[in-house]
Amino acid sequence: MASAVTVLACLLVAFALLAPNNTGRITPWSFARIPVDALLAVPILLLLPARARRVVAVGLGAAVGLLVLLTILDIGFRSVLDRSFHAAYDWHSFGPAVEILAGQFSRVAATALVVLAALLAVGLVAAGSGAVVRLTRVVVDHRAAAARTTLALALVWIVCAVSGVRIAPGEPIAARSAAAVAYERVRQVGADFQDQRRFAADLTTDAFRDVPGDELLTGLRGKDVLVTFVESYGRVALDHPQVNEVLGAGTAGFGARSAFLTSPTIGGISWLAHATLQSGLWVDNQLRYDTVVGSDRLTLSRAFDRAGWRTVGVMPANTEEWPEHTFYGFDGYYDARDIGYRGPDLSFFTTPDQYTLAAFHRAELAGAHPPVMAEIDLVSSHWPWRSVPRLVSWSGIGDRSDFAGRPAPRAEYADTIAYSLRTLISYLRTYGDDDLVLILLGDHQPDPAVAAAHASRDVPITVLARDRDVLDRIADWGWQRGLRPGPDAPVWPMDAFRDRFLTAFGRPPA
């Protein structure tokens, strides 16, 4: 039993010292390397007096536990968001993660998992301390052997470090210091906050800030303009035949121009993409997001509001108060509670896209109305792609309509994207007229497991209008005809869209 505990302690410490890296690659070869941190720690612990040795061992062990915790977080973030965990702002992501768990299981189960995760975090720190204390005791009990082994391994490490010997591609035998990796992570926190301060200074520079309303968006006067985000609609979706089949269908007389935008995020955290498109700023982390939504930056919806439109936000994923809607300048705001869907539970976000569009249309566009600009977030294609709703008759939609489609314990990603796109095209065919302009785009690529590791962050974007003058105004953009942008279609950073859109449809800033 004692030997087994010692082996487990060795494994925990080895994982802490050998797994952390800046590449995100962890292979079995990673643990066949020589950890320089252990070579430095052993002689220090041997030279210290007993009482000081125990204190240092406990402290080093706590650091080991924290390293393991950060490595686990890194693995999770890389698998979902294709980037490492940032301690400065990624704690905010745990709230939405809990909501996803609650949607998949239940609120009680989600709470239990959160408590379990917190206990695991505390347990890792305690286990790290216990592991290092135990291994220190073993080293002290075998002082001579430990000293000889450490010296021999140190010489091997030096030779391998100088010669660059690798046990496998990308895996040098002389492992770099885990402490150095941890130090870089601490420095990253400072760098993230410094970036936030630079961003706060930059956002005050805005060429459109003081453009009067009568000079904004003059080329869209009298039009209803809908900016519709399709959840997880990334470039990878165009590789799927069911999506291409929908994009190849007719659009009821609407002309279409398509290209790609590079999203600031991948796999999730959709609100970063929404803020980037609306503000014309690169909002790629939570610190930047908190900064921009706390400012008076001119968003697209604020520009429409200044120019005389009624502005509306439709966010069926939100189930609680969302103070940020005031930043966007929405005159009207609808979340899941206002939309009022009471039909069958279909996925994580229960409101089917067709019901969202129908509820919006009834509330804002049916009958005589002033020109409306709306951001509408469609979420039926949100992970985990558990089921695909079916299209029903628009005239018969009620709050308890049965949208349940084919039974599927886990629907294909592309099937849900195809449903969202098919719903939008059906909406155009049913309600579209010469005074409707639809901007259809994705918020981000799906997670790397679907998009493939290190895939681009490009998402399709399409402007649809029946009035040819609208499309003529963006002719110099060079976007391609149709709903499907080809491989050589233009690619813009998402933050470039606001200024180019306002320039195309209004007076360029002085």
Image (tube, grey):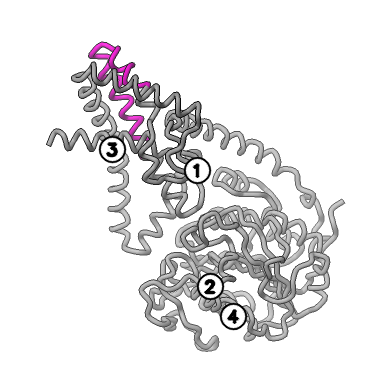
Element class at badge 1: loop
For disc 4, the marked residue is 246
Q: Which amino acid lies under the numbered mark 3 shown in the image of this protein?
A: Leu
Q: Which amino acid lies under the numbered mark 1 shown in the image of this protein?
A: Thr
Q: Which amino acid lies under the numbered mark 2 shown in the image of this protein?
A: Ile
Residue drawn at point x = 70 percent, y = 44 percent: 203
For disc 2, the marked residue is 417
Please report whichever mark, 3 or 1, sits nearer to the chain's N-terminal start: 3
Whether residue 175 is visible here, answered yes or no, is: yes
Q: Quadrant of residue 222?
A: bottom right
Residue 369, horizontal then vertical, whole percent: 68, 76
Q: For the residues carrying marks 2 and 3, which lies nearer the camera in this image?
A: 3
Q: Is residue 288 left or right of residue 412?
A: right
Front residue of 361/165: it is 165
Q: Residues within 10 Å of mark 3 (few under 14, many from 20)?
A: some
Residue 61 belongs to the span the image colors magenta = yes
- The relative height of residue 379 versus residue 246 in the rendered view (above or below) is above
Residue 486, horizontal then vertical, whole percent: 68, 70
Please report whichever mark, 2 or 3, sits nearer to the chain's N-terminal start: 3
Q: Which residues are magenta?
A: 40-68
For disc 1, the marked residue is 23
Q: Is residue 140 left or right of residue 356?
A: left
Q: Residues within 10 Å of mark 4 (few under 14, many from 20)?
A: some
Residue drawn at point x = 27 percent, y = 17 percent: 53
Question: Which of the labelled discs sits on residue 11, or is there none?
Answer: 3
Q: Which amino acid lies under the numbered mark 4 shown in the image of this protein?
A: Val
Front residue of 52/377: it is 52
Q: Is residue 219 left or right of residue 129?
A: right
Element class at badge 4: helix
Front residue of 59/350: it is 59
